[in-house]
Amino acid sequence: MKLNDPTLLKTDSYINGAWHGGNTRFAVTNPATGDVIAEVADLGAAETTAAIDAAVPAQKAWAARTAKDRAMVMRKWYELIMANAEDLAVILTTEMGKPLAEAKGEIAYGASFIDWFAEEARRVCGDVMESPIPDKRFLTFKQPIGVFGAITPWNFPIAMITRKVAPGIAAGCACVLKPAEQTPLSALALAELAERAGIPAGVMNIVTGMDAPAIGNTLCADDRIRKMTFTGSTEVGRILMQQSAHTLKKMSLELGGNAPLIVFDDADLDVAIAGAMASKYRNAGQTCVCANRIFVQDGVYDEFARRLTEASAAMKVGNGMEEGVEQGPIIDSQGLDKIERHVADAVSKGAEVLTGGHRHELGGTYYQPTVLANMSSDMMMFGEETFGPVAGLFRFTSDDEAVAMANDTEFGLAAYIFTDSTSRLFRVSEALEYGMVSANTGIFSSEVGPFGGVKSSGLGREGSKYGIDEFMEIKFVCVGI
Ligand code: SIN
């Protein structure tokens, strides 16, 4: 890996402002080539407890500083990330596989949460309420919740960390974070830049390790951890919630999705195709908000299918470091197996392959951009997210039918609609049981909009003016006068 600043490539965990190697290490591989790119510290429960021990006093000292002071340190961190964006993107693409241009986009997206929450830190306000009792006065303070545990996924190795850590440290909290074992290098580079920015020892601790259950359980069971924040599968989110029940922690869970993308007859098809391509193939289909079920109304179904097939077949697949590549490899063989299972299941139940449908000729974990027609609700792809570059097309006739199919899932993260009718846009947006609705665009994520789901897609909101509240407690103070 060729970096302008090779000192950004860290392979030890970062605890209490120092780098810890531990006794054993695990291999991080490049999914584009299968090559081992680093051997990273393999830590576990004992080191997680040591990180919590360090975070407790560090949090108190950090919270005692003014919000303005914390904001200035965070702003420096943001600037260092932007100044090192090229190197961070190379690290990200090498360990995760997404195309370099997409990785650069993620660095800017990830950094935007730090910039945003540095500003939000200064706008935290309690209230003074009208008292119902003449000789009493009522007010509220907003205070940091304390030390939080964070567990982050491999699909956004930078942005899912900053979306959790930035509001937390802006609020005056400290964290112990476990990055995904597939992508620890981006997390450690962020820690190096946090240290250079002046984030004090113990405020941001990164524990790397293969034994995710041991690290997760240590965080959940420790009563000094007052909040858990997690992005990943619904299955693991439920386990973390159960493990946190004993110590009654506040939870933020950004879990699985099963996003519907609905194209109505009156949609501008240029916009709908661009939106479907952007949403479906972002990160090779490996995001929680990628379109998973594409519902297309009768009148435009054939034309939409033809144009989506043409655009999908033209995509350039390859190593994300190569110029012009639009889709990289799938993260690992388990991910690839799931995609194959979903496609085989759909085809066995009557789906028609319009393009793709197989592993890519490049080998490894590459998969062909795929479009399937004649999809139906008895197929696996209807009920579960595929997390891969497979666009399944379902035909519908009426608005009610589309909404009913879209809501027929335990998940409720993101939904997309394409229509030129304003009244339809409002009616359908209101009827969709989802935390986020994206209308006439395939990309909606931003530090300013609240990100989160309903039903089995999780709890809480990240980013936006609401995100910092997830890391604060409201204290009611009643003053007798
Ligand atoms: C995710 O897939 O979990 C995050 C996607 C986003 O932030 O847009």
Image (cartoon, helix red, strand yellow):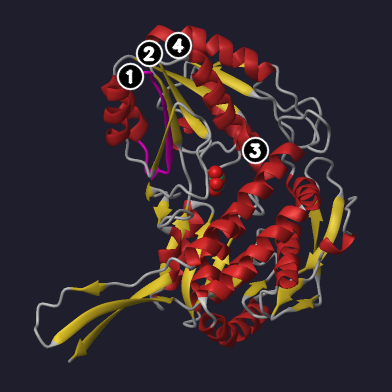
Label drawn at residue 283: 3
Q: Amino acid at mark 3?
A: Asn
Query: In the picture provided, is 208 more to the left or to the right than 402?
Result: right
Number of residues whose C-alpha sits closer than 10 Å to that of mark 3, classed few (under 14), some (14–19) or many (20 or more): many
The quarter holding residue 395 reads top left
The residue range painted magenta reads 408-421
Number of residues whose C-alpha sits closer than 10 Å to that of mark 1, classed few (under 14), some (14–19) or many (20 or more): few
Mark 4: secondary structure: helix
- What residue sits 47% from the left and 28% below the top? 293
- What residue sits 9% from the left and 82% below the top? 133
Number of residues whose C-alpha sits closer than 10 Å to that of mark 4, classed few (under 14), some (14–19) or many (20 or more): some
Badge nearest the viewer, 2 or 4 = 2
> Residue 376: horizontal and vertical position, in percent?
42, 22
Q: Amino acid at mark 4?
A: Tyr
CA gap between label 4 and label 3 equals 26 Å
Badge nearest the viewer, 2 or 3 = 2
Q: Is residue 437 above or below residue 192?
A: above
Q: Are marks 2 and 1 in contact (CB under 8 Å)?
A: yes
Give the residue number, with chain letter if any, for mark 1.
421
